[in-house]
Amino acid sequence: MLGEGILKGLGETARNFAGSFVSAERLTTVQYPEERAPVIEDTRDFPFLVYDGSDWEAGLRCVACQICEKECPPKCIYIVKSTDKKPDYVGKPQIYPTRFDIDISVCMSCQICVEVCPFEAIKMDTQFELSTTDRFGGLLYDRKELARSNEYYHSIHPTEAAEVDARLAEEKAKAEAKAKAAAAAAAAKAAAGPAATAAPVAAKPATPDAPATAAVKPVDMETKG
Ligand code: SF4
Ligand code: SF4
């Protein structure tokens, strides 16, 4: 029926309006800023950088791969790579960002930086009270201002953060098992001695065109004598 959707919408509005006088669940507005509605888990506004441990600088997960910088649609991420390396969460030496800025005044909260990050290093915050009178510097956040602990990440997105932790722990266990197997193989090779480690010497080709494994032509003793 023509206009059925409009009538349904008006009916829902009327039901909520009348219901808000008798049911607290239907009273969805609050007297902000004195009152605040709880922030739901899937809320997102601007990105932050996750760090593990208590030292934000040493614990940053970001390895300055710059994928987020390239994929950000409005190009509001700016990264400078380090020239040295530090261990990442699995102990692998990695470069890190000496500079990581996000211009929050340009960010459109699309979350693409989060989706493309292979290191679970950047996530979306739920903080929205960021207004400032400083139009430029006040909304350009550097890596220190962007850094938030993994505990903070758990406090705002508990379900997602638990899944990420489980995934990282699995990757770490796999990397440790691989390193252990490589160390055991190296130790076994060393214990077997130098004879076991010497590579077999291939026969040299007689001419550049001849194959290395070609049979040596028997010498004609009669013509020699
Ligand atoms: S949320 Fe979107 S716009 Fe904002 S920094 Fe990430 S990719 Fe860029
Ligand atoms: S936040 Fe992620 S995608 Fe962006 S540079 Fe760091 S590791 Fe790479």
Image: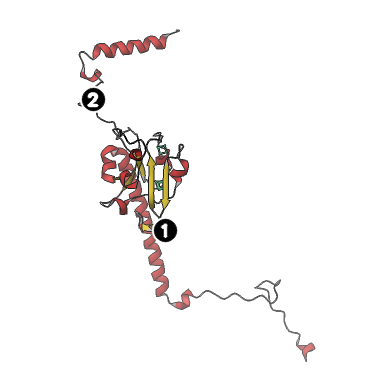
Residue identified by numbered label 2 = 32
Residue farthest right in this picture: 223
Which amino acid does the dot numbered 1 rest on? Thr
- Residue drawn at (42%, 58%), measured in percent from left and top? 83
Q: Is mark 1 within 8 Å of ligand 2?
A: no
Residue identified by numbered label 1 = 83
Quadrant in which the C terminus appears: bottom right
| Residue 13 appearing in the image | yes
Quadrant in which the N terminus appears: top left
Residue farthest bottom in this picture: 225
Q: Position of residue 193 (x, y in %)?
A: 43, 77
Local crowd size for mark 1, using a 10 Å CA cut-off: few (<14), some (14–19), many (≥20) = few
Residue 121: mark in rendering = none
196 and 154: which one is in front? 154
Q: Position of residue 169 (x, y in %)?
A: 33, 50
Q: Position of residue 46 (x, y in %)?
A: 35, 37
N-terminal label among 2 and 1: 2
177 and 127: which one is in front? 127
Mark 2 lies on a secondary structure that is: loop
